[in-house]
Image: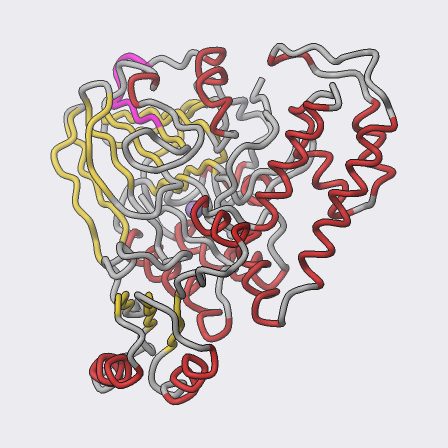
């Protein structure tokens, strides 16, 4: 169970981290009979050829190994899955929030499935067998959290007789994450022997529907919080005679040490604490995040970052200044990236204009990639009424145009007002967990 590897993530010196740790995880998982990837394998929906080719090279390792046999597509159509997929140690995946693309476009996991590297699941499943032991994996790839419940109830997955049944998903789950929309564990399909969920980056074992609910956690830290110093790894499971006999975390060796300090804005004190970390022996430079419990001027924090540049990757999280923009504080509190905020505003504006708010993701992508014309065409298309709301036929067609322009302007304005560093942070933030998005039906 190797989750949230976020290949392609890596600002500055951390560029290689995700790939290195994914390689180590895959290598160490080769003695298993089956590898599961519960989403966010990649950090972006369109990985660069550099990232994609390196991922393929790593995913080639299980091809040369041995594992369970893929015996049945169950609800998955195996006709179009290449023969190569059935060779070697099987890898079964779902896509996560970071890889999800609008309907009709191929996401990176689907691309890897077409190339024979893995099986990709979305509202379907596969059955695997080894020495008479059968395991059925059913997967729900990441869908916008507000639609997770309705997608699940329309799909209505149920366990398969004679198998150890695993349900794999990639959603925000109530009790584990603070988000606007969460899926309650009680709403998960009943009767499965084990539930595995990606998306949440801190590993945890709990219960759902009276069975183990496993969050394997991410391989790398994409956001630095109090929880970040916890060691990363993958989960190894032992299933025998249709029962889960063992579930253990395998910590990875090559990970970068992470420290999270909460300190007063005292230069001497910070210097002393960071020096203590820097003086240790490390294979990889430690990542040190200092949360300041008060204001400190930028020249001082920059000076400290520079002083330790050769021994640690130091960064600061500052308290928003009291006189500072309330909008900035709001963003921090809501943990919304600039792009997420843009999506949210666009969704609200479409709703106000009487247009189909469920189209906002496609419209947003069109605005980002191809400009306003494509976005307008999308809005003029008749609505897909799968999720219920009716389009207001009397809506003013000019409304969204103006708002779409304002939206685009707001995005540009925000980008232009930033320093280089802020821009790169914003572009990272863009790749981070997004909340509500258009429903991509799996039907
Ligand atoms: Mn993730």
- Report x, y in % for residue 280: 20, 83
Q: Residue at x 37, y 58 (%)?
A: 220
Q: How is the image coloured?
A: secondary structure
- Decide which of 27, 102 is in the foreground and name it: 102
- Is residue 161 located in the magenta-colored stretch of the structure? yes
Q: Residue at x 48, y 45 (%)?
A: 433
Q: Nearer the viewer, residue 192 or 378?
A: 378
172 to 293, vertically: above or below: above
223 relative to 327 in the view: left or right? left
430 magenta-colored: no
Task: Using the rendered view, name the quadrant where residue 82 is placed.
Answer: top right
Outermost residue on the left side: it is 245
- Name above or below for residue 299 compared with residue 24: below
Numbered disc total: 0
Q: State whether residue 279 is above or below residue 292.
A: below
Q: Position of residue 389 (x, y in %)?
A: 65, 12
Q: Quadrant of residue 243?
A: top left
* Closer-to-camera residue (289/117): 289
- The residues colored magenta run 159-167
Q: In which quarter of the image is the C terminus?
A: top right
**Which of the image's four quarters has the N terminus?**
top left
> Residue 6 location in percent, x, y?
46, 53
Q: Residue furthest front?
A: 323
Image position of 200 with respect to 22: above or below: above
Residue beneath the point at 40% across and 72% down: 315
**Residue 123 in the figure: left or right of residue 161:** right
Question: Which residue is at 43% across, 47% downward?
Answer: 333
């Amino acid at each position: 169970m190797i989750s949230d590897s976020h290949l392609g993530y890596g600002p500055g010196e951390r560029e290689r981290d995700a790939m290195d740790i994914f390689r180590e995880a895959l290598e160490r998982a080769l003695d298993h009979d089956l590898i599961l990837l519960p989403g966010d394998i990649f950090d972006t929906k369109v990985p660069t050829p550099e990232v994609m080719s390196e991922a393929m090279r790593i995913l080639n390792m299980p091809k040369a190994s041995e594992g369970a046999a893929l015996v049945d597509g169950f609800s998955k159509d195996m006709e179009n899955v290449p023969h190569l997929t059935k060779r070697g140690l099987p890898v079964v995946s779902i896509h996560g929030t970071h890889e999800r693309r609008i309907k009709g476009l191929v996401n990176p996991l689907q691309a890897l499935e077409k190339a024979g590297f893995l099986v990709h699941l979305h509202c379907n499943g596969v059955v695997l067998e080894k020495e008479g032991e059968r395991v059925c994996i059913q997967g729900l790839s990441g869908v916008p959290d507000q639609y997770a419940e309705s997608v699940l109830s329309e799909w209505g997955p149920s366990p398969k007789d004679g198998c150890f049944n695993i349900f794999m998903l990639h959603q925000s789950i109530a009790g584990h994450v603070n988000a606007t929309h969460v899926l309650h564990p009680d709403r998960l399909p009943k009767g499965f022997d084990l539930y595995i969920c990606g998306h949440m980056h801190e590993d945890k074992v709990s219960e759902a529907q009276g069975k183990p609910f496993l969050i394997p956690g991410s391989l790398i830290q994409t956001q630095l919080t109090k929880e970040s110093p916890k060691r990363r790894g993958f989960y190894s499971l032992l299933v025998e005679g249709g029962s889960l006999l063992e579930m253990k975390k395998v910590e990875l060796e090559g990970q970068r040490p992470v420290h999270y300090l909460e300190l007063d804005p005292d230069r001497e004190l910070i210097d002393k604490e960071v020096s203590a970390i820097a003086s240790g022996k490390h294979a990889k430079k430690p990542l040190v995040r200092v949360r300041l419990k008060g204001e400190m001027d930028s020249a001082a924090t920059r000076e400290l970052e520079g002083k330790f540049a050769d021994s640690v990757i130091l960064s600061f999280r500052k308290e928003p200044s009291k006189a500072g923009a309330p909008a900035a504080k709001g963003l921090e509190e809501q943990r919304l990236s600039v792009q997420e905020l843009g999506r949210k505003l666009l969704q609200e504006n479409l709703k106000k204009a009487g247009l189909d708010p469920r189209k906002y993701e496609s419209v947003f992508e069109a605005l980002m990639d191809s400009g306003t014309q494509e976005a307008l065409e999308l809005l003029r298309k008749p609505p897909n009424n799968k999720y219920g709301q009716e389009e207001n036929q009397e809506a003013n067609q000019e409304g969204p145009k103006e708002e779409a322009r304002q939206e685009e302007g707001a995005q540009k304005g925000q980008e232009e007002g930033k320093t280089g560093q802020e821009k790169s942070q914003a572009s990272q933030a863009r790749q981070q967990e997004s909340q509500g998005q258009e429903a991509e039906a799996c039907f």
